[in-house]
Every structure is written in C-alpha cells, then in structure tokens.
Amino acid sequence: MNAPTEDFVLNAAQRAEVIAGLNQILPAHAVLHEVEDTKPYECDGLSLFRQLPMVVALPETEDQVVQILKLANRLNVPVVARGAGTGLSGGAQPHKHGILLGMAKFNKILKVDVQSRSAVVQPGVRNLAISEAVAQHQLYYAPDPSSQIACTIGGNVAENSGGVHCLKYGLTVHNVLKVRAITIEGEIVEFGSEAPDAPGLELMNLVIGSEGMLAVVTEVTVKLVPKPALAQVIMASFDDVANAGNAVAAVIAAGIIPAGLEMMDKRASQM
C-alpha cells in the first residue's frame, strides 16, 4: 500500500519520526525496530528474497490499524501487511524504508452462524482453525492451501488461496461473503454482503487477490459447507501422463466433481 518508488529513502530523522509516531499509537513491545527484532520478518515463504523492514508494527485493534495507516499516509511511508508469512509469492516482502504491519494478533473467531453456514473471523485466524471451530456442527471451511495448518485468512484473502478442494468448492474468492478493510487514508470500508447480492459495484472480487495493495483486511465473513457423509480416497495409476490427464477430463465431463484431484508423475511421487 502507498508504495513509493524503489529508490524511496528515509533519512535518520524521518525514520525516528515514524517510530515515534508508532510508539504513540502502540505499546513499546508492539513496535519493533532493532535488527534482532525485525529479523524474523525479513521474508515470507519465498525465502530467496530477504529484506529487513524499517519497523514492524503489531496492532491489536482496528482503531490502531486506522491510526497507523493515517500516520503512514501523512508521512508518505509504504506499508506492507503480513499474516503468517507462509506465502510463496513474496506478497509479504517488507520494504526497507517502510512499515511491516503484522496482523497476527487479530486471531479471534467473532461469530459462527450455523443457520446461514457462515463465520465472521479476524484476519489472523488460521485457515484450519475455522474448520476445527465448526466441526461440532458438521461444517468446515473448504479452501485448504497446503499451509492451512499455519496460514491465516487475511493472507488467504490477499493471495486468493486455493488448495485441493478448489476443484469442487472454488478459491477463496468463491468462499468469502464479505470483507471489512481499511484504506491507506484510514477509511473503514466493507466489500460484499452477507445477502445473496449487494448494491453497487462488485469490488470484493477486486480486493481478494490484491496482495494487500488496496486495503488492510480486518474482518472476513466466510462461507461454511457441510461435511460430506462419506470421504473415499481413490488412487489410479497410468502409464502415461497424457492418459492421466484425459482420465481427469473424462471424469469431470461425466458430471462427477470430486472434492479434490491431484496428479503426480514418477518424479513427484518419489520425492
């Protein structure tokens, strides 16, 4: 968000002003700027590229996020939002003269509505934690990235994450009803609706997958789906990758949509 050019540089006085401003918003333990404190945030899952952020801010409330973004906007400082940092696209790569906004403390499931099969969660809630919380109601959250045990819903929204189940249930964008977020100006906005349709432009699909470039997510309303009565795993072996691909096409053409399909060649299965 609010990304200046690559040669954007803050001098020592400007850096001190940013840190001082953050210290007025957050308690001291939530503003990290020493090298040993910012080191864990130097990269996300794409560890090939590493860069220490100028400062890490760890808010706990929506109002704190609003104030941080207003500060960054006033001082023209770039902001990178970060969830669990499991992404492989570099979406949480910090800016060396910017604020890394860690949203890990937003980790509450605010509401579960069994009747409407939906849940309202904060962005720091782990993907798998939703399914664990609603398992007693025979429901679960369908998108299942390979990192679902650790990745967060905020990161899933930013990256439009999928997983094996996306074949049948779609990506994150197909399983989110509403997103509450804050712009770089500190304005709280809501995209989508819990209703079947919402007036105005369909902007939620633009926000999902935008990697935090448009707004910082503070709350997400997700869809829940019933657990299947039966789960059966089938493995089929083929002597040719093309034949395996044709079999997948034939299964779907027959009107059978499996919960998930994975194809592995010999090299992948031996790893």
Image (spheres, rainbow, N blue to C red):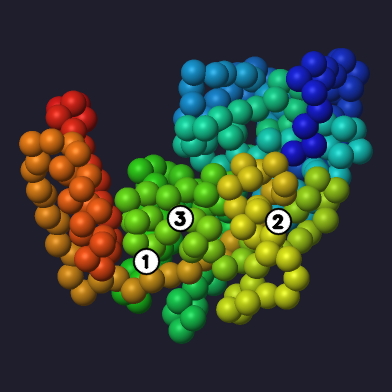
Q: Which mark is residue 181?
A: 2
User: Circle 3 — which element?
Assistant: loop
Q: Residue at x 22, y 52 (%)?
A: 248
**Which residue is the extreme one toward the bottom?**
115
Q: Tell me if 76 is positioned left or right of 101 in this view.
A: right
Q: Earlier in the sequence, mark 2 or mark 1?
A: 1
User: Circle 1 — which element?
Assistant: strand
Q: Tell me if 216 is positioned left or right of 223 in this view.
A: right
Q: Which mark is residue 140?
A: 1
Q: Is residue 253 visible?
A: yes
Amino acid type for the residue under numbered disc 3: Leu
Q: Earlier in the sequence, mark 2 or mark 3?
A: 3
Q: Earlier in the sequence, mark 3 or mark 1?
A: 1
Q: Which mark is residue 171?
A: 3
Viewer-closest of 240 and 173: 240
Amino acid type for the residue under numbered disc 2: Ala
Amino acid type for the residue under numbered disc 1: Tyr
Q: Tell me if 159 is positioned left or right of 227 in this view.
A: right
Q: Position of residue 55 (x, y in %)?
A: 72, 27
Q: Position of residue 97 (x, y in %)?
A: 76, 22
